[in-house]
Amino acid sequence: MALHRRPAVSYPEGWKSDQTHHPFAQVGTNGGALEAVNECPACQAGNPPENKFCGQCGSRLPGCCLACGAGNPADHIFCGQCGVRLGDAAPPTVAAPTETVAESEAERRQLTVMFCDLADSTALSERFDPEDLREVISQYQDVCGGQIEAFGGYIARYMGDGILVYFGYPQAHEDDPERAVRAGLRIIAGVAKLEPKPGLRLHVRIGIATGLVVAGDIIGQGASEEHAVLGVTPNLAARLQSLAEADSVVISDATRRLAGGFFDYRDLGHHQLKGISEPEQAWQVLGESTAVSRFEASAGSGLSPLVGRQEEVGLVFTPISQMNSLIDALRWRLCYKNQYVEELMEWLAWHTRWVNRNGTDFGS
């Protein structure tokens, strides 16, 4: 900021009424009034001290605070109005921390949906005080939630005494239908052991369906916010649950095909379900089958024939045929033949047990 002899120009009335009117005003040695003005670094034009921009070229004037725009003397380091260092921009505003959750986009996928419902819940609500009923429902939900979590399920919603569960979202497994059925059987066994009140036994009905859905859209707000699943599969699971008797699991035909021979079933026939155009085949799960390996369970539901695998099959049967030739060569030594046969049977039995142990039976 430079000092200039005030030119003989007409300033607005009041702006130079006396030399103390503005803090920039100074008195010269010869008694003439000297006015402190901002000199524009671009065009060297003089400007009144309250100007923020040059009146001749529009450039920002030195001494002007970038934060609040107030004018300041040239020897000031900090703005006298807001305290920001001159030449610095306004201090960044620190926003209140907000928790952001990454939302996945909706996607088309195969999903197994379980609908679990407490049987005779209306009678329980009439029988017990609301606080006592809350304890009963809480124990029931704890048992269900523990088994669902153990088998990788996702509880989408609690609806009073009903529970909507997804197997295959947000994390998918190749055996989600099997996991859902196993979880259903374990829920029934766990709830049957409960006695939340003296003499009170609880019973559940479970429906399971598998099909294509679109999952991931978030609907609702606040406490009601949830990941929506669109498709017929959730409705089908709810309808199958209504077919189930107390302490039973009813599944769709698609779930039964994918679960394979891991379970024993009872055919419930075709049913015309509300909201479903075509009759649906329903199956009741009676329990786990006696299959000791995943291959045996798959074989129980039928295997597709091997095509183009002659070489691989030959690698399996060639050593066996060679062993038979060796036994025939030693036929005259019957004792040794029997010993060879015994060794072969033990070897096969050992490797069969090893294969079964190294299978992928769930929960082993």
Image (cartoon, rainbow, N blue to C red):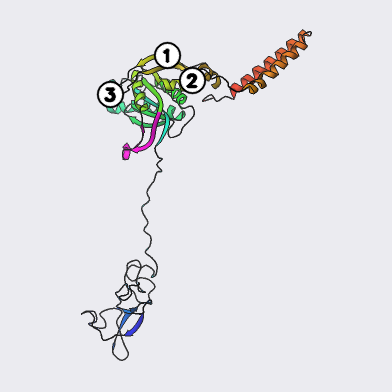
Name the residue rendered at 39%, 34% in the picture: 215
Name the residue rendered at 26%, 22% in the picture: 126
**Number of marks in picture:** 3
Categorize mark 3 by other alpha carbons within 10 Å: few (<14), some (14-19), many (20+): few
Element assignment for label 3: helix
Q: Is 230 colored magenta in this rendering?
A: yes
Circle 2 residue? 260
Q: Is residue 269 above or below residue 2?
A: above
In the rendering, which numbered label is found on residue 125?
3
Q: In the shown orientation, is residue 256 left or right of residue 304?
A: left
Q: Give whichever of discs 2 and 3 has the lower sequence position.
A: 3
Q: Is 326 colored magenta in this rendering?
A: no
Residue 8 found in image quarter: bottom left
Q: Is residue 19 above or below residue 284?
A: below
Q: Is residue 23 above or below residue 292?
A: below
Q: Quadrant of the C terminus?
A: top right
In the rendering, which numbered label is found on residue 256?
none
Image coordinates for residue 135, horizontal then vertical, percent: 33, 27
Type of amino acid under label 1:
Arg
Q: Pointers 2 and 1 in contact (CB under 8 A)?
A: no
Name the residue rendered at 65%, 19% in the picture: 350
Image coordinates for residue 176, horizontal then vertical, percent: 46, 27
Asked if residue 247 shows in the view, the reply is no
Is label 2 or label 3 in front? 2
Q: Is residue 352 above or below residue 4?
A: above
Asked if residue 91 shows in the view, the reply is yes
Q: Main secondary structure of the magenta part?
A: strand
In the rendering, which numbered label is found on residue 266?
1
The part of the chain drawn in magenta is: 212-231
